Image (tube, coloured by chain):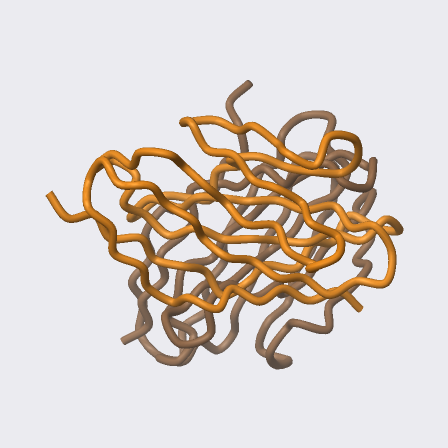
Amino acid sequence: DAGVIQSPRHEVTEMGQEVTLRCKPISGHNSLFWYRQTMMRGLELLIYFNNNVPIDDSGMPEDRFSAKMPNASFSTLKIQPSEPRDSAVYFCASTSMRPGNEQFFGPGTRLTVL
Amino acid sequence: AQSVTQPDIHITVSEGASLELRCNYSYGATPYLFWYVQSPGQGLQLLLKYFSGDTLVQGIKGFEAEFKRSQSSFNLRKPSVHWSDAAEYFCAVGATRDDKIIFGKGTRLHILP
């Protein structure tokens, strides 16, 4: 199994530009999570999906952030317009339905907004 | 709602010394508990987990953790650390009703040669 795949691994963009981060969960997993990690705030849960449906988006910081999961094998996190304070590492994780199963993390996307 | 506290932001130990990283949780029922490790520039990797049974859990890389319900703790231990153990360690707690887990702020482990 290839594990959780994220792309791009690094993204540098200018303030005001649209940024799209991509995630492919592990095959057979039906829950997907987007996290943001910064030095100041640590690891924050932004949103999670179960069976492609958003369950909890209370961690999404602003309307500039949006996430979609059009099918079981793909999800996107979009920031528009991007701001310097969005600079962080964004992780995607997936797990199977059973409570207590661990989440498997992707390698992350390091986003830098200039 | 569940919560996790890792009281130590940084810990420094000498190579070969023993290690204990503290974790306290808050949850009304029996929780699912996890320890993850994050090496620099990497994603999080599961070290071990507890959800029932024996309260002493063995994990990868020689780590173990003990669930103590009376103390609401799930401390991570290793008898002898190696330089490659330098990383950030996250304790996490999951609820029985959904897949969401809550992470602590992390403890960064430094190893002295």
Quarter of the image for residue A17 reads: bottom left
Residue at the location (82% across, 59% down)? A55
- Which residue: 79% across, 58% down? A54
The percent coordinates of residue B6 (x first, y second) are 51, 64
Nearer to the camera, B43 or A81: B43
Q: Is residue B42 left or right of residue B105?
A: left
Residue A94, given in percent of the width and then of the height, sits at: 65, 40
Compared with A33, B52 (above or below) is: above
Quarter holding the C terminus of chain A is bottom left
> Which quadrant would residue B58 be assigned to in this image?
top right
Task: Tell me where residue B51 appears, x and y as whole percent.
Answer: 76, 38
Of residues A99 and A18, the one nearer the viewer is: A99
Q: Residue furthest front?
A: B70
> Chain A, which colour?
brown
Q: Is residue B56 left or right of residue B11?
A: right
Chain that is coloured orange in the picture: B
Which of the image's four quarters has the N terminus of chain A?
A: top right
Q: Is residue B86 left or right of residue A45?
A: left
* x and y percentages locating residue A15 in the rendered image: 35, 79
Figure disc tally: 0
Question: Which residue is found at the position 76% from the left and 40% from the top?
Answer: A100
- B48 relative position to B54: left or right: left
Q: Nearer the viewer, residue A84 or A97?
A: A97
The residue lying at 53 percent from left, 41 percent from top is: A105
Instruction: Specify the farthest residue to the top.
Output: A1
